[in-house]
Image (tube, rainbow, N blue to C red):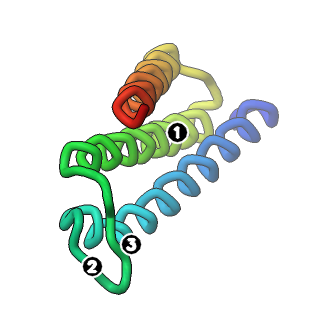
């Protein structure tokens, strides 16, 4: 049986990961029609960015979903084993760095 402290940490990671995956998935699916056709009115909305900006935004969304999926997997690992993993922590940090890099790229292209 995993220690209570680790088990709580695992459940927190699991639920936060699920939240990220579900919310970003819903957002991605709801704005995809407009973003895939920049400049055209779709469902009463027009995305005024470029195709490259849309790709960058979707890359950011995908990275957030990947971060959420990693959190889910790490949370399950902690719940089942009762211990932490350096490999999962390194993967989460790598994805966080990717998120930062993509975000800075989007910020730089908008300015």
**Quadrant in which the N terminus appears:** top right
Q: Which mark is residue 71?
A: 1
Residue that mark 3 sits on: 30
Circle nearer the N terminus (2, 1): 2
State the SS at label 3: helix
| Viewer-side label of 3, 2 | 2
State the SS at label 2: strand
Q: Which mark is residue 88?
A: none
**Quarter of the figure with residue 59:** top left
Q: Residue at x 63, y 52 (%)?
A: 15
How far, Cα to Cα, is label 3 from label 2?
A: 14 Å
Where residue 110 appears, as percent x and y from the top left, is: 39, 37
Where residue 45 appears, as percent x and y from the top left, is: 37, 77
How far, Cα to Cα, is label 3 from label 1?
A: 24 Å
**Quadrant in which the C terminus appears:** top left
Q: Residue at x 76, y 41 (%)?
A: 8
Q: Is residue 6 above or below residue 45?
A: above
User: Along the horizontal axis of the image, is 11 left or right of 73?
Assistant: right
Q: Which mark is residue 41?
A: 2
Q: Residue at x 38, y 39 (%)?
A: 63
Q: How many C-alpha atoms fall within 10 Å of the one at disc 3: few (<14), some, or many (≥20)?
A: few
């Amino acid at each position: 049986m995993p220690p209570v402290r680790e088990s709580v940490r695992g459940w927190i990671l699991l639920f936060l990961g699920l939240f990220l995956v579900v919310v970003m998935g819903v957002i991605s699916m709801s704005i995809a029609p407009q973003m895939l056709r920049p400049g055209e009115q779709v469902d009463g909305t027009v995305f005024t960015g470029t195709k490259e900006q849309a790709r960058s935004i979707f890359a950011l969304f995908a990275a957030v979903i990947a971060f959420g999926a990693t959190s889910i997997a790490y949370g399950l690992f902690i719940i089942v084993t009762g211990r932490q993993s350096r490999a999962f922590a390194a993967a989460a940090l790598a994805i966080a760095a990717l998120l930062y890099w993509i975000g800075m790229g989007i910020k730089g292209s908008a300015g």
